[in-house]
Image: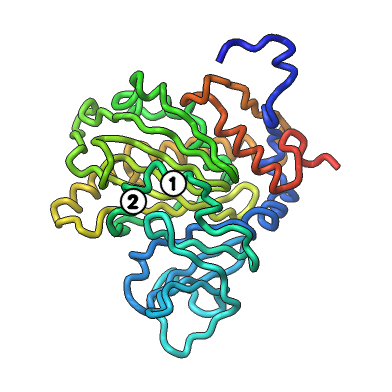
Amino acid sequence: MPPRNHKQWTKTPKVEYISSECYNNNEIFQREIKEIFAKVWVPVCHMSELYEKGHYRTTQIAFQNVIVCNTGNLGVRAFLNNGPQQPSGKLWNDETFGKELHCEVRHGQMVWVTLNPEPDMTVDQWTAGAFDCIEDAIDTEELEVFHYHKAIINTNYKLWHDTNSEFYHDFMHYFNRVSGFNDEYFARKNIPFDNGHVNVSSFTVNYEEYDGFEDRGELSFPNLPPNQWYMVDLFPGFNFNLRGSAYRSDAVTPLGPNQVMIEFRGYGLKSDTKEERETRIKHHNSIWGPFGRNLHEDLIGVAGQGTTMREGTEKRNILHGRHENSTIHDEVGMRHYYGAWGDMMGVNPERPLAA
């Protein structure tokens, strides 16, 4: 993008900066729960976690207890949960639940639930094409969860989503600098979709450049060229990350203005042999496991941001002003996200508490 002159700079995009009040104000947080999380489609688990009739998973959406269960011939169903409190298990015949919720299985056999009693969009309409870049890779064969862990971090949930949207923090990852900083990396595009979603186009990762790592091309997901890396960022806080041989999802559950639970899942193909699965787990955990090369660095980063932006700290503005033709360090993804956030909240992200 050519440099902007003074007149062009005064005609800024819809969201060029946001106030730190978006991150730390309890009034804003309560409004987010009501206007966003109580209305959107949420990926709560994967079908492979409900592999037999009677199996269930429990979760929380907008502070409402939710259960999803495999009912056999009637498929996967979701309800407000006034029964089992365990994260997972098998139901008995005499279990009773609250109100039934809308539920769909889409995009790599993820189970999606919304609290909205009358959703005006299906899951496909809500995701708006953001999954198209990896659809052939995750929908060709059945997937299976092989890894799960969660983290509770003292930070705002949007700061976690931001770290999947901006790429300045990639310089924090030694692994990324060694294996990925090439011309292809810097030419990647941030591609916005309706409803605040963004996906990031692919490039070839040179895994063998990192000491002790190996090329991952042989185990790439179906229809995926060797060693490619695609990422889908879904509003308001869900991420799907495909690194050739390993696939990961993140799902946030906001617990307060400065606290979030993040659930991480790793996936392989159900058809994997024992040896293939072991290799795939190794590839996943070496980067995204709790002791992998990247994930803990991301969590440390957003925990630090949570400390500096917690309630009571000095109000500041966060600039999203970098324009580079939608390439990887262009902040178009951030501007797009907070444009959608402001629309759903009915506020201006630059002055969210203004009357």
Q: Could you tell me residue 37's position as x and y percent?
A: 62, 56
Task: Give the CA distance from mark 2 to mark 1.
Answer: 9 Å
Judge the density around disc 1: few (<14), some (14-19), many (≥20) Cα neighbours within 10 Å: many
Q: Could you tell me residue 78's position as x and y percent?
A: 51, 72
Judge the density around disc 2: few (<14), some (14-19), many (≥20) Cα neighbours within 10 Å: many
* Kind of residue at badge 1: Phe
Mark 2 touches mark 1? (CB < 8 Å): yes
- On residue 131, the disc is 1
Instruction: Name the quadrant containing residue 134.
Output: top left
* Kind of residue at badge 2: Ile
Nearer to us in this view, 341 or 121: 121
Q: In the picture, which quadrant includes the C terminus?
A: top right
| Element type where label 1 sits in the image | loop
- Name which of mark 2 and mark 1 comes first in the sequence: 1
Viewer can see residue 333: yes
Q: Could you tell me residue 162's position as x and y percent?
A: 54, 37
Nearer to us in this view, 313 or 99: 99
